Amino acid sequence: MPVTNPRPLGERELALIDLYANCKLELSPQRFYSKWGVSYEQIGYICSRSPTTVRRWFARGCSYRAPSSCDLHHLALMDFLLNHYEEIPTFLLGLLCPVKREKSNQDDT
């Protein structure tokens, strides 16, 4: 659905875009793994990658594959959330990560 009346960007919004675009929030899989008691499967779940891909991030030699900057960003963001979870208001977590509600039987009638 096209936006017919987009909100204009003011100085504040442009500054926020600049801050976000220049934010280098990254954490390596090795560092995340050593910090938290997670499995390769859980790291894959966080980054939307297969366990095989995650294993390649930890491999040496010709089997090694580097994680993308998006993967590093996902791990850094998850690290931030794990570190500050208790400080983040519930309503803000709900806005950031809305819970998908399953369709109830009442919705079918």
Image (cartoon, grey):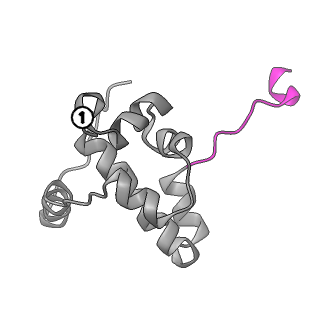
Location of residue 1 with respect to 45 vertically, above or below = above
Kindly identify the residue that appears in the image at 53 percent across and 78 percent down. 87
Disc 1 is placed on an element classified as helix
**Residue 101 is one of the magenta-drawn residues:** yes
Q: Are there few (<14), some (14-19), or many (20+) residues within 10 Å of tag 1?
A: few
Q: Residues in magenta?
A: 98-109
Residue at (16, 54) in percent of width and height: 21
Q: Which residue is mark 1?
A: 61
- Which residue occupies the foreground of this view, 43 or 1? 43
Estimate the x, y position of residue 52 in percent, counting from the top left: 45, 29
55 relative to 87 in the view: left or right: left
State whether residue 92 is above or below residue 64: below
Tell which residue pokes out farthest to the bottom in this image. Answer: 87
- 72 shown above or below 19: above
Q: Is residue 105 magenta?
A: yes
Residue occupying image coordinates x 52% and y 40%: 45
Residue 100 point in image, percent of width and height: 64, 39
Report whether 96 appears left or right of 3: right
Q: Where on the picture, by quarter, is residue 12? A: bottom left
Q: Quadrant of the C terminus?
A: top right
Q: Quadrant of the N terminus?
A: top left
Number of numbered discs on residues: 1
Three-letter code for the amino acid on which mark 1 is drawn: Gly
Give the residue displayed 87% in from the left and 29% down from the top. 106
User: Please, is residue 97 above or below residue 87 in the view?
Assistant: above
Give the dominant element type of the magenta stretch: helix, strand or loop.
loop
| Residue 78 place in picture, x, y as percent | 45, 58
Coordinates of residue 48 in the picture (x, y in percent):
45, 35
- Work out which residue is located at the far top of the displayed protein and give it: 108
Image position of 10 (left or right of 38): left
